[in-house]
């Protein structure tokens, strides 16, 4: 089984981003109820709704643009931009104090995630090895799930020992650093 370099790069990219996000997912509701003034289960619910609404709308709009008018280079750049927005949103959670801060950051995170995924999915679909589609999509899913599983366990330990700020900082830095991974695709596509 030989996997081409572009697919390996995309799997690594997804692994890094979702591993960073895995630090936040299991503790996000606790963060809101413990650290946000007026943070309740209602705020948690609305925060999830806002994320999903902004993700969904932006995902459809960006997918349309990706399919109709973006070059391969611009797809990579859009995915990098989206990744940076996600990482930035996690770093900004450190300063969040009120529900409207959370809602704004959830909107930013949803937009960033959508901008990252539309070109990512397009590139992955285009460069997937024929006859190995299920295997390569499976490898992508398993690697990201394993990364999230590892960081989910670690996030609880880190919060108990060091607090929320270190976890949000680590997630943001990991995700922003992962935005450099797609740059390696340039060399493979444009030799």
Image (cartoon, helix red, strand yellow):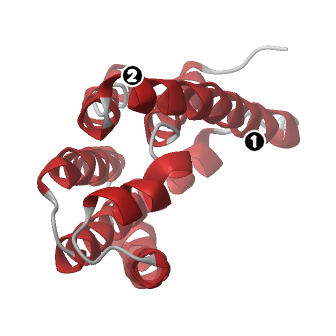
Residue at image coords 22%, 53%: 93
| Residue 61 seen from this side | yes
Which dot, 1 or 2, sits closer to the camera?
2
The residue pinned by badge 2 equals 161
**Which sits in the foreground, 69 or 44?**
44
Q: Position of residue 7 (x, y in %)?
A: 60, 30
The number of numbered badges drawn on the structure is: 2
Residue at image coords 15%, 64%: 97
- Of label 1 and label 2, which has the lower sequence position? 1
Q: Residue furthest toward the top?
A: 2
Q: Position of residue 190 (x, y in %)?
A: 32, 28
Q: For the residue labelled by badge 2, is the local secondary structure a helix, a strand or a loop?
A: helix
Q: Position of residue 77 (x, y in %)?
A: 25, 46
**Which sits in the foreground, 70 or 175?**
175
Q: For the residue labelled by badge 1, is the local secondary structure a helix, a strand or a loop?
A: helix
Q: Position of residue 20 (x, y in %)?
A: 43, 34
| Residue 191 seen from this side | no
Residue at image coords 35%, 21%: 184
Q: Is the C terminus in the top left, top right, bottom left or bottom right quadrant? A: top left
Residues packed near mark 2 inside 10 Å, few (<14), some (14 to 19) or many (20 plus): few
**Which sits in the foreground, 70 or 164?**
164
Q: Residue furthest toward the left?
A: 95
Cα distance in 3D space between marks 1 and 2: 36 Å
Position of residue 95 relative to residue 151, above or below, is below
The residue pinned by badge 1 equals 137
């Amino acid at each position: 089984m030989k996997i081409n370099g572009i697919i390996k790069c995309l799997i690594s990219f997804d692994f890094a981003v979702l591993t960073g996000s895995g630090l936040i997912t299991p503790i996000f509701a606790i963060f809101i109820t413990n650290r946000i003034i007026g943070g309740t289960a209602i705020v948690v619910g609305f925060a999830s709704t806002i994320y999903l609404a902004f993700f969904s709308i932006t995902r459809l709009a960006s997918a349309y643009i990706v399919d109709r008018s973006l070059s391969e280079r611009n797809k990579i750049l859009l995915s990098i931009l989206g990744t940076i927005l996600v990482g930035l949103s996690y770093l900004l959670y450190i300063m969040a104090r009120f529900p409207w801060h959370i809602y704004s950051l959830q909107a930013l995170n949803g937009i960033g995630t959508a901008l990252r995924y539309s070109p990512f999915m397009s590139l992955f679909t285009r460069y997937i090895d024929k006859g190995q589609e299920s295997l390569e999509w499976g490898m992508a899913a398993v690697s990201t799930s394993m990364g999230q599983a590892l960081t989910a366990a670690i996030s609880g330990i880190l919060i108990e020992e060091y607090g929320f700020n270190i976890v949000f900082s680590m997630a943001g830095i990991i995700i922003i650093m992962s935005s450099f991974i797609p740059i390696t695709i340039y060399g493979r596509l444009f030799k």
